[in-house]
Amino acid sequence: MKAATGELNLTVITLIAIAAVIAFFWAMWPQIQNSINSQWQNVSGTTGTGMIVLNK
């Protein structure tokens, strides 16, 4: 019975850890997405209108 309790505790700790990671990314996703989009615009040279701007 003691081993089953230990396994239950480990399962609960694992679920809490997974929930914490999901909550972190849930809260941070808008900032991550904005960062990715701004970096993509810098790399692709687009103005956000679908037009490519070539600078000399």
Image: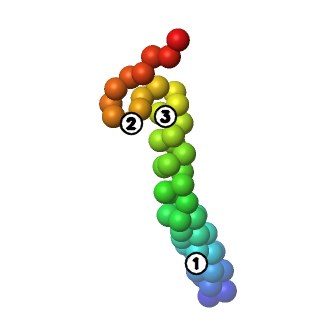
**Which of pointers 3 and 1 lies earlier in the amino acid sequence?**
1
Kindly identify which residue carries mark 2: 48
Mark 1 belongs to which amino acid?
A: Val
Marking on residue 40: 3
Residue on which the image places disc 1: 12
**Secondary element type, mark 3:** helix
Which SS class for mark 1?
A: helix
Q: Nearer the viewer, residue 53 or 41?
A: 53
Q: Point out residue 40 in the picture as x, y percentages from the top left corner.
A: 49, 34
Q: Quadrant of residue 28?
A: bottom right
Q: Nearer the viewer, residue 20 or 31?
A: 31
Question: Quadrant where the N terminus lies?
Answer: bottom right
Above or below, 51 against 49 in this view is: above
- Judged from this view, the residue extending furthest toward the left is 50
Residue lying at 54% horizontally and 36% vertically, measured from the top left: 39
Q: CA distance from mark 2 to mark 3?
A: 10 Å
Residue pictured at 34% horizontal, 26% vertical = 51
Kind of residue indicated by mark 2: Gly
Q: 10 Å neighbourhood of mark 2: few (<14), some, or many (≥20)?
A: few
CA separation in Å, label 1 and label 2: 46 Å
Give the residue type that dot 3 points to: Trp
